[in-house]
Amino acid sequence: MTMFDTTTPAAPVVPTRGRLRPLGLDEVRITGGFWGDRQAVNGTATLTHIESRLESEGWLPNFDLAAAGTLPAGRRGREFADSEIYKYLEALAWEIGRTDAAADDDLERRFRRVVDRVAAAQESDGYLNTMFGREGQGERWSALQWGHELYCLGHLFQAAVARVRTRPDAGDGLIDIARRAADLVCREFGADGRDAICGHAEVEVGLAELGRALGEQRYVDQAALFVERHGRGSLGEIEWGRSYFQDDVSVRDAEALRGHSVRANYLSSAAVDVAAELSDESLLAALRSQWDRTVERRTYVTGGQGSHHQDEAFGDDWELPPDRAYSETCAGIGSIMFSWRLLLATGEAQYADLIERTLFNVVATSPGDDGRSFFYANTLHQRTPGIPADPDATSPRASSSLRAPWFEVSCCPPNVARTFASLAAYLATADDDGVQVHQYAPSAVRTTLPDGRVVAFDVETGYPADGGIRITLRADAEFTLTLRVPAWAEGATVRVHSGGEVESSEAAPVGSVSVTRAFRAGDIVDLHLPIVARATAPHPMVDAVRGSVVIERGPEVLALESIDLGADVGDAVVVGDPVERDGHVVLPVRHRSTGDTVDTPLIAYHDWARRGPSTMRVWIPTT
């Protein structure tokens, strides 16, 4: 693995060693397009909505009660409610960095006000939690199986990382709050302390990244200690088994991700962090093998993960029923976290392929157009039309059949917010030879390679609506530009325009195509990815969808919605190939009830239920 300069970019994940170095918000800016629109809505609507609900639900006022010494009276929310405040702070920190908000900007003022309230609740030894530790509450660390104390602190640490990487000298106090809490965790749970883990992995990934950001190796070592303690059965047996907590077998011995899908992805992400920092190649190899099996056998075509509602968990191999897909939004984000770390460690494009699939078909699906409503779970087959959610109500987590404004367990809205705010940091990377572009969006890339070469280029594209991607060089530099070629992009081509000359070549879907040359400002590299509708058959072992097809176009999974069919989607059978007509993908569908065949437009799955209640399916039966 290559060692990186510790001058870190403004990014959520910055390993000190690996195959690739991430480019942060200070090096990559999304300037428009599909993701630019979502970032704009996130910044102007979603963040305000989240803060309003954190206040009205009482989760933020819990910190005021703690500071006043009146808890437990008046405390509201679940045992993990504190974590949503920390995810909101993380999202704000990335948004401040993304927009270069001024010190007197509204975003900055909001950030500092919340930090002040959190700081007032922290105890002198660093302990910080509104659910435990006071008279009338459970003792500290007395309910590690379900209490989420360490989980909440993990999200605090990630919020602090965002602040370190965007405004390290702000002086608001968040970094000091996190440092005191992390020191306490190391004292309490270090090698000579409690031999225990949290029932919900998260502190591991938070500690690892905080250690990187602050140059504190003991935080990384504590993360490694927590990772290695999984699999000892210390959390006890529950009805869903110890695999729910990833406490049945060690991380090194697991064959695939299993149990609660968010917990599993967070733990795996932390394990990659540990493997990278400690140069543990055997641990990294185990995680890569687990990723392979999980993606092949336990991941939906949308990139969604988790096929059990009762325990929000992975099913067995090939257990992927579309109508019972839980596919929690947070699990999709956790999957991106895991895949991104493996990409940085190995440089292999398959990890970026899954990130793209999950971004477009899980993360983009969750929020409503106004940024104030969300899907918690992401089914692939809605059998009955949904019921519009009350905009003022709080919904049970997965029972909302349409996007809802808030949930009793509202982990997903702030998770989406922090992902969108930091999204530019997942677009591109660098190594000693050049820059690699993994995700396509209108953007500006400006970075300096280790030997001082300045690389600057702009990306123009209408992706994913079309597959034309134009890279325009803005500075003279000799380097290698590497562009990901998705596995579905048969017939991709690349052209280099320089000094009036054009060089063309095929870019077979083998992961990536590289152009090495002495670029001059004004040179253009055009990548063309053929984006056409295609029918995909399921793996024959997935019995729930045998005899069905899913239609995809580029990175997007398409869906059949009753609004377009004019009938319940359960009445539809595919009788021909998809065609593109007038900007729409049209599928010949026969109504089983009438025998009529109708050319029916499909929509991008992430757009389903935006026009009102409907039935919907992704996998459609064939004749």
Image: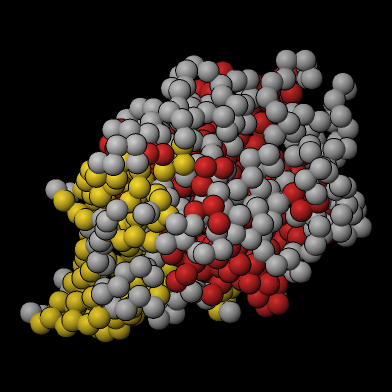
| Residue 38 appears anywhere in the view | no
Q: Residue furthest left?
A: 500
Residue 603 location, quadrant: top left
Measuring from the top left, give residue 293's x and y in whole percent. 61, 67
User: Which residue is at a point 17% across and 74% down the rendered structure image?
Assistant: 523
Q: Nearer the viewer, residue 391 or 482?
A: 391
Choose between 522 and 385: the one closer to the eye.
385
Residue 348 in view, yes or no: yes
Q: Which residue is found at the position 79% from the left and 19% from the top?
A: 72
Label count reads 0
Q: Is residue 100 left or right of residue 321?
A: left
* Colour convention of the picture: secondary structure
Q: Quadrant of residue 551?
A: bottom left
Q: Which quarter of the figure has residue 15?
A: bottom right
Q: Is residue 534 left or right of residue 314?
A: left
Observer-nearest residue: 618 or 174? 618
Left or right of 350? Residue 58 is right
Residue 499 falls left or right of residue 207: left
Residue beneath the point at 70% across and 77% down: 282
Q: Position of residue 463 (x, y in %)?
A: 27, 56
Image x and y of residue 276, in percent: 64, 70
Relative depth, front residue between 95 and 497? 497
Q: Quadrant of the C terminus?
A: bottom left
Q: Residue at x 73, y 23 (%)?
A: 67
Which quadrant of the rendered structure holds the N terminus?
bottom right
